Structures are given as structure tokens and as C-alpha cells.
Amino acid sequence: MALTQGEALNRESKYNEAGAAFRNAANIKADGPGSPQTQILSMELLQGMDQFYSGDYTSATQHLETYASESTERQPLAHFYLGASKLARFFLTGSEDASLRQEALNDLKVAKQAGFKITGQDVSPKILQVYKELAF
């Protein structure tokens, strides 16, 4: 029941609610049918990307860090958006925190080394320029 509810909420892009439903299913049986633990992590990735596009870079970073640390799938995608979120925060804060910029570059390098490609209309041209100029 909780797993089915989570899947329905996910289709509606209600990631907070879907994550809660998947956590409920995982509490019942973590390795149960439908892989609720995997679904929870997928919600972290989707929620992180949703927060990125909503301009909430701090929340995006939290969700994407959770996903990147607990899942081995879709790592290039997660690291790209993690780096992009940190770089956006760096730019928005007046480029004051050099360590935040370095963290962003490290995440972006992981994505680039894995061959991750992004289209220009999806992300700020400023972030895309940094990504294109990265050497590894």
C-alpha cells in the first residue's frame, strides 16, 4: 500500500510525500517488493534536481549529497547537479566562499570525467561555461 502510494505521488511530482510513503514502506520491509530503499534514494535525486530548478540550492545540495553518498547509480548526474547547486550558491553569495567553489568544481569534475553531457538551455550559461572549461 505505502509503495503504491509512493509511486503515485512520484508521478505527480510530490517528492516529499512520495519519499515519506517509500520510507514507510521501507520501515515495514526494507528489502521488500518494489525496492523501497532504492525508491527513497530516487526521490532524493529527483527532489534535489527539483530544488535546483526552483532556485533552492541549499536544499538541492542536501538531497543530492544524500543520494550521491548512498547510491551507486546515476552518479554523474547527481554530481553535476551537486556541483551546479554549489556553484550557483557561490555566485549568489558574491563569490566569497572559495571552499564552496572548490567543492563545486570537484563535483563537476566527477561528472565530466564520467562523460556527463548537459544541454545549454537547462542550466545557467555561467555554470555551463565553468563546466565546459574544466580540465581533469
Image (cartoon, grey):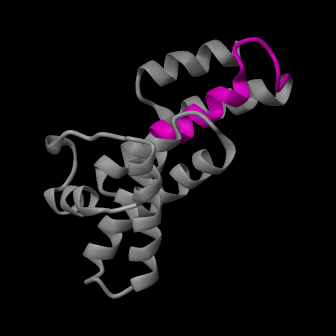
Q: In this view, does 17 lie above or below 91?
A: above
The total number of labels drawn is 0
The foreground one among 95 and 48 is: 95
Snapshot quadrant of residue 133:
bottom left
Q: Is residue 37 left or right of residue 7?
A: right
Relative image position of residue 11 (x, y in whole percent): 44, 19
Q: Is residue 42 in the magenta section?
A: yes
Question: In which quadrant of the rendered image does the N terminus lie?
Answer: top right
Q: Is residue 67 in the magenta section?
A: no
Q: Is residue 32 left or right of residue 81?
A: right
Q: In this view, does 62 lie to the left or right of 13?
A: right
Q: Which residue is drawn at 57% across and 55% down?
A: 65
Snapshot quadrant of residue 82:
bottom left
The foreground one among 115 and 4 is: 115
Question: In which quadrant of the rendered image does the C terminus lie?
Answer: bottom left
Q: Which residue is drawn at 59% across and 22% down?
A: 6
Relative image position of residue 53 (x, y in whole percent): 29, 47
Q: Give the range drawn in magenta.
A: 29-47
Relative image position of residue 119 (x, y in whole percent): 20, 39
Q: In this view, does 112 lie above or below 72?
A: below
